[in-house]
Image (tube, rainbow, N blue to C red):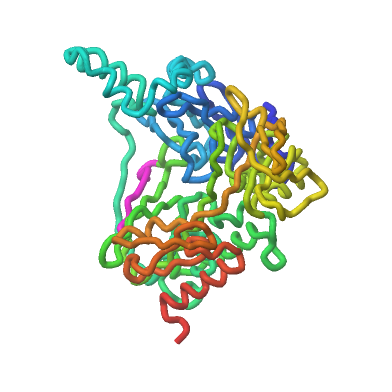
């Protein structure tokens, strides 16, 4: 079976093996190292769901855990799991996935009529309309509304899997295994400290896996791989992939969920599916990175419209393009990085639309000063409408649009004990404030340091400060 949007070479997938999976009953193929979203995109599938209320077509917006759109049901029978992000679901052979929140097929969702009637289905519509007669609410109105609303469904069968809990202790907990987290772990690990390095992804390295620049004589991804190999060889370092830190509690206690067997068809005998860890640590380094911001415009939710960084991740990490013709809409240089990386892979760039008058120019593709104001396409993007700086309109034919509005540091865990972020005018984003969980140090993009060199330096410094390694 041909994966029409799979780039011929590169990426961090294992092309020597093939995984077969189904989505809405149709068979597809992918490779180890794919997510469900990247494998579907490789097979030309952009439409992966419907929106909650109006049932508008939805495809992936991101390539990570911040995904709001590509929510699917995994597995079947007693192991059915609703509302799972396709962008973080690790592909395995025999995976069964289904779209959700639809009536009829995904392409011909009967409840998409709500989108046509959106002017009448305003906020509070249900409560204002279905008040009379009161006796109809429980017998008629509520069952119909509940059937139409909601997202995934439960099988209501007993879960056959087992779940465990455990306790871990360390000198330093590092949350996030991007450049800052890896630098901090390497510094503390070489110093002999007991270190736990936790990251939610199944492939550690953060944005290093999605970029093409080098660190020294190696690519960013290869550098991360070498650092992880050294960390795993150290007896005082515990490397925990597929592990999400979910809370910062009093007295240096953190909660974390490790997905032990979610990437398997069924858990190995005697193995739990997930483990809830209670981690006791003396100090913590938060290196959770940053999330790219979208830009608002009319119909900016069509399948094919993604964050520019996500397009770059799919191209560089998964060797997938969302379409063979891509446009970029940006207000910063990061959007141009995406265009350059995609162009280098042979993907046609319809144009880069930049709101700035002093935007960098590239003679390999057109750069327009202006802004995207609307899009077209029923089940996926087909055209982007651009208003140029001189007031004229321009229509770009494209199947994918990457949007880059800057970056927001991931400050969530700094706020778990009444911490309040502060506004950074230069970044147009919130950064961690002085009040955060005790003994927590923030490094890398999570602290507002957006360069790779700065992230590496801040990671080393955070480890030294946390464990007084300067003494």
Instruction: Give the residue at x 33% y 19%.
Output: 147
In the image, 449: left or right of 280? Answer: right
- Relative to 133, is 267 above or below? below
Q: Quadrant of residue 303?
A: top right
Q: Nearer the viewer, residue 463 or 93?
A: 463
Left or right of residue 458: residue 53? left
Which residues are drawn in magenta?
A: 269-278
Residue visible at 21% across and 14% down in the picture:
132
User: In this view of the protein, can residue 13 be seen by the observer?
Assistant: no
Residue 273 visible to an observer of this rendering? yes
Is residue 7 or residue 108 the one in the foreground? Answer: 108
Seen from this angle, which residue lies furthest front?
A: 391
Q: Nearer the viewer, residue 225 or 162?
A: 225
Q: Is residue 160 left or right of residue 267?
A: left
Quarter of the image with the N terminus is: top right
Which residue is painted at 75% across and 45% down in the image?
367
Residue occupying image coordinates x 48% and y 35%: 69
In percent of width and height, residue 102 lies at: 44, 21
- Indicate whether residue 400 is drawn in magenta: no
What percent of the width, then of the height, locates residue 408? Answer: 50, 54
């Amino acid at each position: 079976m041909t994966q029409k949007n799979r780039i011929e070479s590169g990426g961090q997938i294992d092309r020597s093996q093939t995984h077969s999976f189904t989505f809405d009953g149709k068979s597809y193929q992918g490779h180890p190292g794919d997510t469900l979203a990247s494998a579907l995109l490789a097979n030309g599938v952009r439409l992966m769901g419907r929106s909650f209320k109006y049932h508008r077509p939805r495809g992936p917006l991101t390539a990570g855990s911040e995904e709001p759109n590509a929510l699917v049901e995994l597995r079947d029978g007693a192991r059915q799991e609703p509302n799972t992000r396709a962008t973080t679901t690790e592909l395995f052979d025999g995976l069964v996935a289904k779209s959700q929140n639809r009536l009829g097929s995904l392409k011909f969702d009967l409840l998409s009529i709500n989108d046509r009637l959106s002017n009448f289905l305003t906020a509070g519509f249900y409560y204002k309309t279905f008040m009379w007669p009161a006796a109809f609410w429980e017998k008629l109105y509520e069952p119909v509304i509940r059937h139409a609303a909601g997202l995934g469904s439960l099988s209501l069968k007993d879960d056959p899997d087992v779940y465990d809990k455990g306790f871990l202790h360390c000198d330093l907990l590092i949350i996030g295994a991007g450049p800052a987290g890896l630098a901090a772990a390497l510094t503390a690990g070489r110093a002999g400290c007991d270190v736990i390095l936790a990251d939610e992804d199944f492939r550690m390295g953060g944005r290093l896996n999605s970029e093409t620049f080098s660190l020294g004589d190696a690519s960013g991804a290869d550098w991360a791989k070498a650092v992880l190999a050294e960390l795993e060889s150290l007896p005082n370092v515990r490397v925990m992939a597929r592990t999400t830190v979910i809370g910062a509690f009093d007295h240096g206690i953190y909660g974390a969920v490790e997905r032990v067997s979610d990437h398997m068809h069924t858990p190995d005998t005697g193995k739990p599916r997930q483990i809830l860890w209670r981690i006791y640590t003396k100090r913590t380094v938060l290196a959770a990175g940053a999330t790219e911001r979208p830009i608002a415009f009319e119909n900016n939710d069509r399948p094919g419209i993604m964050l520019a960084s996500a397009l770059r991740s799919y191209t560089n990490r998964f060797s997938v393009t969302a379409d063979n013709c891509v446009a970029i809409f940006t207000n910063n240089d990061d959007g141009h990085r995406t265009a350059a990386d995609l162009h280098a892979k042979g993907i046609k760039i319809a144009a880069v639309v930049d709101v700035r008058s002093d935007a960098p120019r590239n003679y390999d593709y057109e750069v327009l000063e202006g802004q995207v104001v609307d899009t077209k396409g029923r089940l996926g993007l087909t055209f982007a409408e651009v208003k140029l700086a001189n007031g004229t309109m321009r229509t770009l034919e494209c199947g994918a649009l990457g949007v880059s509005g800057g970056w927001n540091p991931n400050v969530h865990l700094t706020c778990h004990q009444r911490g309040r972020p502060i506004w950074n005018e230069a970044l147009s984003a919130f950064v961690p404030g002085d009040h955060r969980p005790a003994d927590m140090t923030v490094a890398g993009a999570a602290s507002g340091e957006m360069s790779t060199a700065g992230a590496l330096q801040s990671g080393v410094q955070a480890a030294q400060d946390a464990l007084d390694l300067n003494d």
